[in-house]
Image: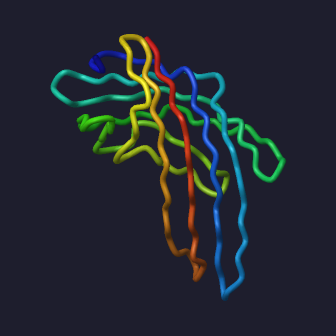
Amino acid sequence: MIVGEWNLSSLNYAGKTEVNFQETNHTTTYSGVAENIDYSLTFNADNTFKSQGGYDVNLTTEGISQIFSISEFSSSGDWSIDGNILKTSTNFAQMSNNDMTAAESAGEVIIQEMTENRIVLTVDQVSKFNESGFENIATISGEYVLTR
């Protein structure tokens, strides 16, 4: 049922970034909504995929909204399904949290709904990294809706 070309019809996400330095914590929350979407994702019968296109992200951070363009994004790799988990070998889309552009969808996403003409995928991820002595923890939850 997943094989074929799909178009991204919506992408919504929210998260927070926690920065810890010398026992001082700072948390920033954000949310993003895709607009002006021209993005497709094709799942092939040989378990490869290809994604391409772009969209604008209306990103709200601490009450301030900005538009970021994710243009000419393309990716390809392998895919598999295990129960309600879609696994991909590389990123098939990007989300931005204003501090960095994060390709958050490699690995595993949860298939919430899959019909002949609609797929709803959700992602919940936590990333930890150190930068210049600062410990950063980024948490993101998002929903992709694909249609054909």
Q: Quadrant of the C terminus?
A: top left
The answer to whether residue 79 is visible is: no
- Residue pushed farthest bottom? 22
Residue 134: image x %, image y %?
A: 60, 78
Residue 61 appears left or right of 3: right
Q: Position of residue 79 (x, y in %)?
A: 25, 35
Is any atom of residue 19 visible in this view? yes
Q: Residue at x 38, y 15 (%)?
A: 115
Residue 47 in percent (x, y) is at: 20, 30
As displayed, is residue 36 above or below residue 132? Answer: above
Q: How is the image coloured?
A: rainbow
| 60 relative to 14 in the view: left or right | right
Number of dots carrying numbers = 0
Q: Nearer the viewer, residue 103 or 111?
A: 111
**Please, is residue 1 above or below residue 142 in the view?**
above
| Residue at image location 65% in from the left, 57% down from the top | 16
Q: Which x, y percent locates residue 68?
A: 67, 39
